[in-house]
């Protein structure tokens, strides 16, 4: 006999309508794919001694790449959390559409 934890999720998707769930999920996944391609491009590049960030500040390459990868990781994590909430809402729409409202 198996065991586990049952839970109900009550959430809110800010500025996302019920009919936008699939497109928002695709957008998040597309952004994550783009970020991974950018990470791979940084990995394949010959590193310079210094690099500039988006504001024009110059950093040693190791420090710059560490900051850049941290930014990418945070954005990917945020997108993945949103995709999980979108999946929860989508599941609720399929199972109990009367419990999903816009407002």
Image (cartoon, helix red, strand yellow):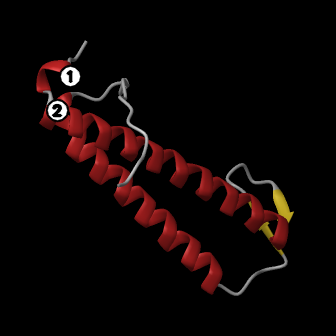
Q: Position of residue 42 (x, y in %)?
A: 63, 76
Say which mark, if any, is on residue 100.
Answer: 1
The crowding category of the residue bearing disc 1, from other C-alpha atoms within 10 Å (few below 14, some 14 to 19, many at least 20), is some
Q: Position of residue 46 (x, y in %)?
A: 70, 87
Say which mark, if any, is on residue 1.
Answer: none
Q: In which image quadrant can residue 66 be found?
A: bottom right
At mark 1, the secondary structure is loop
Discs 1, 2 touching: Cβ within 8 Å: yes
Along the line of sight, which residue is nearer the eye, 29 or 58? 29
Along the line of sight, which residue is nearer the eye, 3 or 19? 3
**98 sits to left or right of 54:** left
**96 sits to left or right of 44:** left
Which residue is depicted at the point 61% across and 86% down?
Answer: 44
Q: Quadrant of the C terminus?
A: top left
Along the line of sight, which residue is nearer the eye, 37 or 53? 37
Q: Quadrant of the N terminus?
A: bottom left
Q: Is residue 57 above or below residue 99?
A: below
* Outermost residue toward the front in this view: 1
Residue that carries the numbered disc 2 in the rendered image: 93
N-terminal label among 1 and 2: 2
Which residue is depicted at the point 41% across and 66% down?
Answer: 33
Which residue is depicted at the point 36% across and 57% down?
Answer: 29
Along the line of sight, which residue is nearer the eye, 42 or 88? 88
**7 sits to left or right of 61:** left
Q: Position of residue 64 (x, y in %)?
A: 78, 64
At mark 2, the secondary structure is helix
The crowding category of the residue bearing disc 2, from other C-alpha atoms within 10 Å (few below 14, some 14 to 19, many at least 20), is some
Q: Is residue 100 above or below residue 2?
A: above
Q: Position of residue 78 (x, y in %)?
A: 52, 45
Which residue is depicted at the point 69% across and 57% down?
Answer: 70
């Amino acid at each position: 006999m198996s065991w586990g934890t049952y839970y109900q999720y009550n959430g809110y998707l800010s500025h996302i309508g019920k009919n936008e769930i699939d497109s928002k999920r695709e957008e998040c996944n597309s952004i994550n794919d783009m970020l991974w391609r950018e990470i791979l491009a940084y990995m394949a590049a010959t590193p310079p001694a210094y690099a500039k960030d988006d504001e024009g500040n110059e950093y040693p390459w190791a420090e710059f790449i560490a900051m850049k990868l941290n930014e990418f990781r945070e954005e990917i994590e945020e997108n993945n959390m949103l995709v999980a909430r979108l999946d929860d809402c989508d599941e609720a729409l399929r199972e109990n559409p009367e419990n999903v409202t816009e407002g």
